[in-house]
Every structure is written in C-alpha cells, then in structure tokens.
Amino acid sequence: MLLLVDLDNTLVDRASAFGSWSTAFVRSIGKPNSEADWLIEADRDGYEPRDLLARAIKGRFGLDMALGDLVDRLLHEHVDSMTMETVTTQALTNARELGWKIAIVTNGTTSQQTLKIQKVGLEPYVDAVVISEAERVKKPDPEIFRIAARRLGTDLTGGWMVGDHPAADIAGGQAAGLETGWVSRGKEWPGETASPTLIAGTAAEVIDAVVRQGRLAK
C-alpha cells in the first residue's frame, strides 16, 4: 500500500511560518506591518519562483541587497518557524503500522526541503523523501510519483497522493493514476480539474480517511 504525501501546507504549516517571517522582515526594513500582506500574496504559497519574488521585493521596497542574499533569506529564514501537529505524526504512524509505505514528494530545493524535514523531525515517520531539485523533475509531472514508488520498491498501482495543491498534488497524482486526497485548509475545491477522491481540512484527517478506505477495500 503506497501513500505519497506533500510537505508544505500538508505535513507542515508553511503558510504560518512564512507569514510570521514576512511580518518580521518588513519590520526589519522599516516598513509597516501591512506590507506583509503584499509579500504573502506575492509569495503565492511558495509557488512564485524565489528569484522573481526577490526581484519584486527589491523593486517594491527599494532595497540595496544582493539578489542572491535575498533569495537565500526567502528559502531558509522562515524554516525556523515551521511546525507540524502531533495528530499528523500520529496519522503517519498509524498508517505505517498498518502496512502503508510512505514517501514525501515535494517540489523545492534540496537544501530547503531537507532543512524543513529535519526541523520538524519528520524522518522517523516516512520511508523515503523525494525532492524535485534532486530528481530534476517536479510535480505535477507523473515521473516524480513513479520515482517515489520505485524508491519504496513498488509501483503506483492502488497508491494515493495527498496534498494541498490542486494542480501539483491532485491533478499530478491523477495523471499518474493515483487516488488523491486533497488537504483543503478550509478552502472550497476550485473545480478547475477533476475532483479528488477524498477531501478533508487537514493532512491527518485525509491520511486517516485514506487508511480507513484501504482497510475497507481489503
């Protein structure tokens, strides 16, 4: 039984971490807290390329800061604020005890995503980690899901992909032939692509539902 799970805003709360960093950053450059709202929107939940976001920040605030230094800050400084709920680790533990093989499948740089996983202590709860930069392919390309399955010594047959992003996680998982569980974070399904198999508000709820469905299918 194969369970592939996204990292940011699925297993870990990236949105809150980046929001806290954004407020601290605009304060540090002498700007009002309200400018953090612009920065959070421009970040697009982490999907805006870091170099483009850094250029936008420099332009908006007139910063005399090396682009590379700002990109590095965008990649790494918010990681210290990353959190993961206990119910999430409990859900992962329960799934593994019931025979599920679990891999994190995440887009991003190897250094940044590895640092996040280490920061929240995720390693003991999963069997493999697949990061787009290291594999030179990213979600929603079906190949990254096949890589994860091979890493676990299996294929995608009967497997699941769980994540918060409608295109990268859900449409990508569907294209790979996986069942999908959407972590809604309180949002409505946008309806731009085919609906996921399961929808729930948190990763723990989705993972628990996947496990229940797996047990019923036996």
Image (cartoon, rainbow, N blue to C red):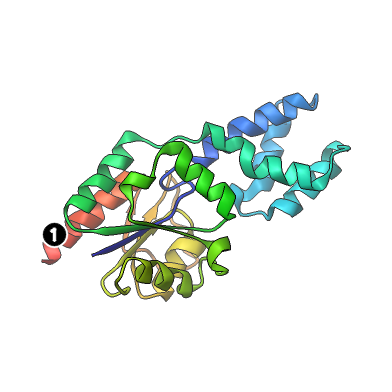
Which secondary structure lies at badge 1? helix
- Please identify the quarter of the rendering in which residue 19 is found: top right
Image location (x, y in percent) of residue 176: 40, 75
- For the C terminus, the quadrant is bottom left
> What residue did someone put label 1 on?
215
- Please identify the quarter of the rendering in which residue 189 is found: bottom left
Circle 1 crowding by C-alpha within 10 Å: few under 14, some 14–19, many from 20: few
Image location (x, y in percent) of residue 216: 12, 61
Image location (x, y in percent) of residue 27: 73, 24
Please report the residue visible at 69 percent of the width from the left and 51 percent of the height from the top.
Answer: 50
Please report the residue visible at 37 percent of the width from the left and 67 percent of the height from the top.
Answer: 151
Determine whether 39 is above or below 33 in the image.
below
Please report the residue visible at 79 percent of the width from the left and 27 percent of the height from the top.
Answer: 29
Please report the residue visible at 64 percent of the width from the left and 45 percent of the height from the top.
Answer: 75
All told, the count of numbered labels is: 1
Image location (x, y in percent) of residue 205: 29, 46
Determine whether 69 is above or below 27 in the image.
below
Work out whether residue 32 can be spotted.
no
- For the N terminus, the quadrant is bottom left
Left or right? Give the position of 209 relative to 31: left
Work out whether residue 30 can be spotted.
yes
Q: Amino acid at mark 1?
A: Arg
